[in-house]
Amino acid sequence: MTQLIGALDIGGTKIAASVADATGFLARMTEATVKSGAPDALARQCIRLLDAAAEKAGVAPALLQRVGVSSCGPFRLHGDGIALVAPNICGGLSARGNLPNDWTELPLQGVLAARFAQVEIRNDCIAALQGERTFGAVIDARDCVYVTWSTGIGFGLCVDGRLLAGKQGNAGHAGHLLMDPAGQTLCGCGSRGDLESLISGMNITRGQALDTPALFAAAKAGDAQARKLVTTAASWLGRALYDLTVTLDTSVFVIGGSVWQHHGAWLAPIVRHELESRFPVLTHGVTIVPPGLDAFVADVGALCLVMPAEWIEPWRASRPWQNLHHLPN
Amino acid sequence: MTQLIGALDIGGTKIAASVADATGFLARMTEATVKSGAPDALARQCIRLLDAAAEKAGVAPALLQRVGVSSCGPFRLHGDGIALVAPNICGGLSARGNLPNDWTELPLQGVLAARFAQVEIRNDCIAALQGERTFGAVIDARDCVYVTWSTGIGFGLCVDGRLLAGKQGNAGHAGHLLMDPAGQTLCGCGSRGDLESLISGMNITRGQALDTPALFAAAKAGDAQARKLVTTAASWLGRALYDLTVTLDTSVFVIGGSVWQHHGAWLAPIVRHELESRFPVLTHGVTIVPPGLDAFVADVGALCLVMPAEWIEPWRASRPWQNLHHLPN
């Protein structure tokens, strides 16, 4: 019998469903995230996409019983498992009022568990760290942190060889560390002065009349004000990495996300200085590395949550996620 | 054969060595912490005290083979285990220059392991949390944090039912979270603006010509300046508890230490407000509780590191640490 596993990558813009066997990915389907209808519309969409991916792979959908899920958060934990309370999908939680629903919570684990025998759901940065620890830049690292610096700021944490979940699966929301008591920008979480409000791709321009790529272009061209904004942002990130180092006694940070991907080489010395110039016995030797997986880190991370152990060595050799670009959608 | 376990409580001022069997504590000996001689003088003192405690208990010292250790930190990890790099004992690390040695590191685990078959060493706040999770205020809690607010600020962290150690056993040094970019007071770690530099018993008076008890007395009597200093300190602690909540998704904080013990009831509303007024899905329902163990939390916590599982229920019933005050020294 074919051993089959599935992966879901649930984001505020799109959902990707993948199906894989021991040899690699068999099919991958994506759709825009459903944002209207009954509150279980998103979970139903996930099931429909997974079943369609199995059919496209030429496998009976009923054979797909183990699914790993990488999802945007935060989560709320109920008796039947994890529900999503994500402000980028739930209109009832969004401060911007531009979503076509008044949802305040989306059932997820309960609905999926009625269809699949095993469902493992993790915050997207935790799933990404699982992927990086299995196939990426920090294979089998015991004490490591995944960071995404993108439109938001997120973290996945691993201490003593175990990924941290916390009481509702929300460990790693350190993008909301309070950094600057004088910070004025309102974060989506409702706070001011937290890390995300200071440096996320949405906030870094601080009301300047230019977008993030233009800001970095101006900074690199020598514009003093732009340069001050981006170097200050890098300093805040470095301080947050220091905070996590003294809290968790970690060894290595894997930094991804679009801002870091494009500008990380330029910003890294500032970040390193903030991290390394303090409390040497804890910070000495802590490293910052780029991700080892590419744009499909969420799919791979989600699969890792339910992957049979005996697949890992063959996948490390064949790196089947590198072929995902060529799968028909 | 008598089953016997030992505990060490290693602090900058004194060392306590205890010996216990299934019925409770048999003997406890304390001495001022050795701060001169060869770098292994402290570890030798620990062995001598444990052997003496066994003899006082009427047991052959050779029967004592399992020892739990609660120690001030930070730690450095070598091939033979944990060494202490504690600035309150090592003259070569102290900024104050008032210690009678030039040690920069003290061997501990290697020396103890040559005498005892099993040695488990943890930072004092991690050991305290182990004690509180076994016999105290948070029995079997999965997601909990121990906090001490005393001359220093320390934390012990437990996530998903497991105490966090980190790469060298230094997880929980969140007393050195960077809080106030404008902070001027120099912390013992070398930073400015970290939590300990803002609120520890040594720093809270901010150069006022009065000690900590006098400061709190003045605040409670209505002195505006004193009141501002202590309420600001409580706000900083609340912000740090918020930071740990979003990082770890924790459920409960156990706060001890002399400052909180004496003034916690008065400060708690300020701390709770800072914690609870942000990011409700993560902070809702997070509680702050007093410790369940008393002054002997370090001894009990250290014993818990090596205690046979079958002792736990009888000890929960008999609470033998309550008799420690009456043991002859």
Image (cartoon, coloured by chain):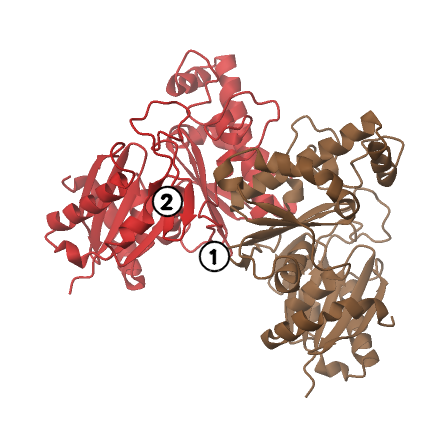
Chain colours: A brown, B red
Residue A53, above or below A198:
below
Mark 2 = which residue? B83
Tell me if residue A196 can be seen.
Answer: no
The first of marks 1 and 2 along the sequence is: 2
Badge 2 marks a residue whose secondary structure is strand
Q: Mark 1 vs mark 2: give the one in front.
A: 2
Gap in Å between the C-alphas at discs 1 and 2?
27 Å
| Residue B161 numbered mark, or none | 1
Left or right position of A82 against B222: right
Q: Quadrant of residue B151?
A: top left
Q: Mark 2 falls within which chain?
A: B
Q: Which mark is residue A41?
A: none
Left or right: B37 in relation to B141: left
Q: Residue at x 66, y 38 (%)?
A: A271
Compared to residue A268, the image places residue A254 above or below, namely: below
- Quadrant for residue B325, please give it: top left
How many numbered discs sit on the rendered protein?
A: 2
Q: Residue furthest top?
A: B209
Amino acid marked by disc 2 = Ala
Chain of the residue that carries numbered disc 1 in the rendered image: B
Q: A184 above or below A33? A: above
Picture coordinates of residue B44, whole percent (x, y): 23, 43
Mark 1 residue type: Gly
Point 40% across, 53% down: residue: B79
